Image (spheres, grey):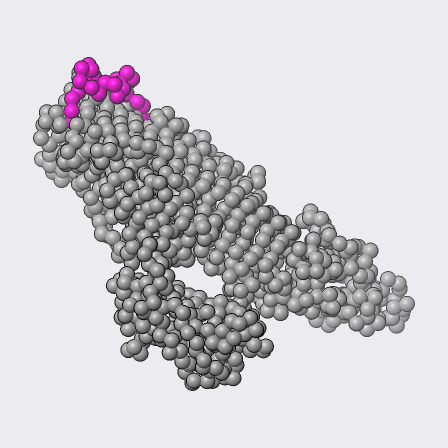
Amino acid sequence: MRFFFIDWILLTSISSKAALGVDVKRLRQSNRPSNAQGSPTTLFSSSLDPSENDETSGRVLAMDMDMHMDHNMFQPLSCNDELSVDDCVIGSSNYLGTLSTVLGTTPTGEQVVIPCGKCAVVETTDGSTKSLPDGINVEGMLHFPSTANLTLETTHIVIQGILQMDPPDAALRNKVRVRMVGSEDHILYPHTENESVCDGMVCNVGKKAIVVAGGRLDIQGLEDDTCPAWAKLQSTVPPSGTAASTDCPLDHDITQGDGSFASVDIGSTPSGFGQHHSSGTFEVDKDEDGNKYLTQVVGWKGSGLRVSLDMTCADPASASNNGGKYRFSFRYRTHEGGSNGVAIWLQLQRTDGGRRNVGRCPAPIDNEWVTCTTIITLTDVETELLSQVATTMETKSGKTIDYDDVVFEAVARSHKLTVADPKAAACWGSRPNDEILITNIESSGGWADQAVKTVQSVDDFTGEIDVGQTKTVGGNPTSLEDDIHMASEVAWLSRPIVFEAEGDGPSNTIKDALHGGHLIIYHTPNVAQRIEGVEIHNFGQQGELGRYPIHFHMSGNVAGSTVRKNVIRESNQRCVVIHGSHEVLVEDNVAFDSYGHCYILEDGGEEDNTFKNNLGARTRTQPKEHSIGSSDHKPSTLWITNPKNHFIGNVCAGSQSTGIWFELRAIRGDSAELSENEGKDPKVLPLHTFKDNTAHSNHNHGMTTYFLGYRPHSEALFEGITSYQNRNGLMLHGTSNVRVKDAFFGMNTGSGVLYFGNFITNIIENSEFVGYCGTSGIKFSLEPRRSQVEVYSTSFSGYNDACNSGSYGKPLNIGNVQSKKEYDMPILSNLTFDSNIAHALNIGTNLENRNIFIEDHDGTMNPSGLPGFYVNDAAHMTTFIDTDLCSPGLNNQALFCENTCLRRIIVDTGSRDDYQMVVASETNSAKVFTFDKYITFNSANTQFDVVLPLDNYNVHFLRLPEQEIMVPPAVTFTFDDETNLDDPPNCEHITTASISFGCMQAHEECSASNECCSGDCSGEGKCM
C-alpha cells in the first residue's frame, strides 16, 4: 500500500468532486487567460471563491504533488525551444517587456504570467521593493540582468520556462532579494504540454514555494566564480600597538596559605600585567643553571600558590565585556616519591569570597618540570572583583613542590585573520556588511561553537580580513600555523542574490515560526539546473515532508545540474536534498544553523551524485513532534543513504548528533517503486568515492555506520578521513570489507575509532591517532570470527599524558563493548607510539575470564624490538607462559610477553555432557591448569577455548559433577587460524603433534569402559 503526505486537502476522484458540486473543468480553466500563441496559459491559484462550494469552505480540491502521478515527468515546453537571453531586449519579437509593464497589465488578484516563448526583464535598479502579491508563473523567460537591484516580494514562483539571474554588478553594489511571503498553500496548473503529469488535475505545491516544473534555473550570483566559499584559517593577526605595559605590574605579594615556603626571597617581577601580551613572572632560588624558582613545602591539604592581581588596568576589551580571555600558566616539579597522590586544581578567587575552579594540572612526574596552563573566560563579576589566581593541592602535607615561570596574561584576541585561499580577502569584503563564519572558535568547543563576524575591512595585498574585536571571538581559534589537521574553517556567508522568507507555522523552544520558503526541482529530468552564488535564508518548513531549501525531487537523470557556492542559513528543515535524482554536482556550499539532516540523499535510490567541498555547521536536532518520519531527530550534517555517489572534501563542523552518517536502509518512498531499484540493497552497493572528508566538533560521532552497517561486496575505501573533537571519531558497526586509509583521528573525548558488532574484517592503515589522558585511540570489542579489525602502519601519540587520577590514555583498548561467544583478536603490525609501550594496550577488567592474545608481529610495540604477544594477566593465560619474559601494562591487566608464541585451540568434546579439561606441560610438571567449558561456536557440544605457547602437552577430561576421568566420545582439536583462514602466528607455534592424551600422575585411575590412557587399563582401574 502506498501512503502520501497530504497536509491540507481532501483527495477524491473527479467524480467525487463533481458530487461535491465542484465544476472541475471550470476549476482548471476559469481565470486562465490566453497567451500569445492563443493557447491557455497556466495559473498558480491560492484559492477559489468560497461560494462555489460551501462544503469545502474555500479550500481548493486538488492533488498533492506526488498523488497518482506514476512518476510522469514534466518536459521543457517546446514553445521555448528558440528562446534565449538574446530575446530579452527591445526590438526582439519575443520581448514581452519589463516586469513592471507585465505587472501593470495583470488584473488585480491574479498572478503575473510570463507567456511561453516570451521574455520579460527585471528593470528595477534603485533597490526598491516590487511586490507580486499573487505570485508569478514563468512559462517563458524572466531575466534578472546584472543591473537589477531590488527586493522582489511574492507568494510563489513557478518556473515552467526559464529563470535567468545574472551576477548583480559588484561595482554598483547591486543586490537582488527574493522574499517569499504568505501562509496559504498554492496550486500548480501545468501548461497544456504537461497537464498529464498531474493526471489531468492540479498539484498542491505548498506555501512560499519556488517550483521548477519542466523549466530551468540559470542562476549565477557571483561575478567571479573563483571566489572561495570557505577556506581553512591560515593565521590570526594580533592587533598592533598592544605592547606590554609596565605601569600596571602583577602584584608580587606572593603568599601561600600557611606561610611555609622554604624560601621567601621573591626577587623581581620584570614585566607588568596590562593589555594583551603583557605578563607577570617571578623566580625565586637559583638552581644549578642559574634559573630561579620558588619552593613550597606543603603544610596542609588545600594549600597552594596564590598570585594577587591588580585588575584596575586589565585588558580594556575584557574589562568592559563578559568573555574576557586570560591565560594562567606555570611549571611545577615534585621530588623523588612526591608525585604519588598529588593533584593540583586551578582556581579564581574574588574579593567577595567567591571562587571557581578553572582547570586541573597534568599529573606530576618526579624530578621533571611539568607545564600547567589554562585559558580562563572571565564573567563580568569576576572582571570587576577578581583578586587572585591560585593553585589548590590535593595531597598530604610535607611534600615539596617547586614553581617556576608563573604567567597571568590577557589572551590577544585577533582583529584580523588570513585564510588559506589568497582570493578570499578581495571577494569577501566586496560589499558592505558582508559576514563570515568561523568554526571551532574556542579551539576545543562543542557542536555550536561557531561565531558570525561582520567584515570591517580587507587588505587585498596582505590577504588580511579585519573582523573587529568583540566578546564573541574570545581566544583565537586554531589556524593552520597552529595545527595542520585541526584548523578552523572560515566561510563567506553573504551573497549578492538572496532568497529569503518570512516565517509562520509552528514553533519550538528555540525558534518561532518554523515554516519559511522552499525551492523544489520537481519531476524535471534531463534539464541541467544551475543554482550558484545564492544566499538562502529561513527556508524549509519543519514537519512538512518535501519542503526544503534546495530539493531535487524525483527528477531522474539531471546530468549537468550544479548547486554551487550557495549559502543556506537558518534552515528550518534540512539543507540540500537530492531525492530520486541523479548526477547532481553539489559543490562548495555553506550551510549554517539548520534543523535535521543537512546534505542528504533522501530515499536511498539516488546514484552518481557528487558532494564536494561543502561545509556544514551547527546542525540541530529536529524535534520529534515535528518529525517527517525519518531520523532527523538524530541529525547528521552529511546523511548518506546510498554509497554509489562521490563524497570529496566535505567538512561537517558541528552537529548536535553526528557529522557523517552512513544510514543504509532499504530503498523507500517513491524511489522504492521504480523498476531500476527493484532488488537493490544500499548496504551492499559499491562506494564510488569517499575521500578527504572532515568531521569535527560533533556532539556524538564524527562519522558512523551505526546501526545497519555497510557491507559492500567489493572493498570500500574510506580515504583521508579527518575526525577530531567528537565523542567518537568513527564508529564502525555492522560493517565489513571497509578499508580506512590515511586518516587522522584527534582529541576525540571517547575513542578515535569505536569498533564493535561488525562482519568480516575491516582494515585501518597509514593513519594517525592523537589523544590525551582518559581517551582511547581504537576501542574494539570481542568481534565474531573473521570480523576483527586489522591495523597496519599507524601511529599513536598523546595518550601517555596521565590524568590526575593517575590513569592514562589507551591507544589500543579492548573491552566488552558487545559480548560475543565467538571472537577473534585484532591483527596489529608496524604500529608506533610516543607513549610508554606498556601503556599501548589496555584490556578491560571485565575480560579477565576471556582469552586475550594479540600478536605484535614485528616487535614495533616492544621497546626491545622483539616480537611477542599481549595477553590478559589471568591464570588461564599465564600458567604456561614464561612470565619472566613479560612486562606489565595498563592497570596491571595486560602483559606484554616477548619471544612468546601463542596459538589458539578450540576443543570440541562431541558431547553435551559437562566436562572440565586438564592440560599439563610435559616439560614442567608445575604447569597444570583445569579449564572450564566455554562455548565458542554455535554448537550444543561442550567446548573449550585454550591459548597455549610452544610446548608439549598432555590433555585429559573430567566429567562433572563427579569429576570422573573420562574420554569424551569424539574429541576434535581445531586450531583457530585454520578456521578463519588467517595465517598461524608469525613464530614457532604448537601443532597437533604437541598434544597427546593420557593420565597424569595425579589422575591415573580409569575405568574399563572409558580408557584415559594411551595404553590399556588394568583390572584394578590403573593405567598400564
The image shows residue 943 at horizontal and vertical percentages of: 69, 60
The residue at 53%/72% (across/down) is 290
* Residue 298 sits inside the magenta stretch: no
Which residue is at 30% across, 66% downward?
Answer: 314
Instruction: State which quadrant residue 820 falls in.
Output: bottom right
Q: Main secondary structure of the magenta part?
A: loop
Q: Nearer the viewer, residue 639 or 801?
A: 801
Residue at (59% x, 69% y) in the render: 891
Magenta highlight on residue 77: yes
Q: Quadrant of the C terminus?
A: bottom right
Q: Going by the image, does 397 lie left or right of 963?
A: left
Is the residue 788 above or below the residue 126 in the image? Answer: below
Residue 141 versus residue 736: which sits nearer the camera? 141
| Residue 916 visible to an observer of this rendering | no
* Left or right of 56, for residue 628: right
- Locate residue 780, reporting x and y percent: 56, 56
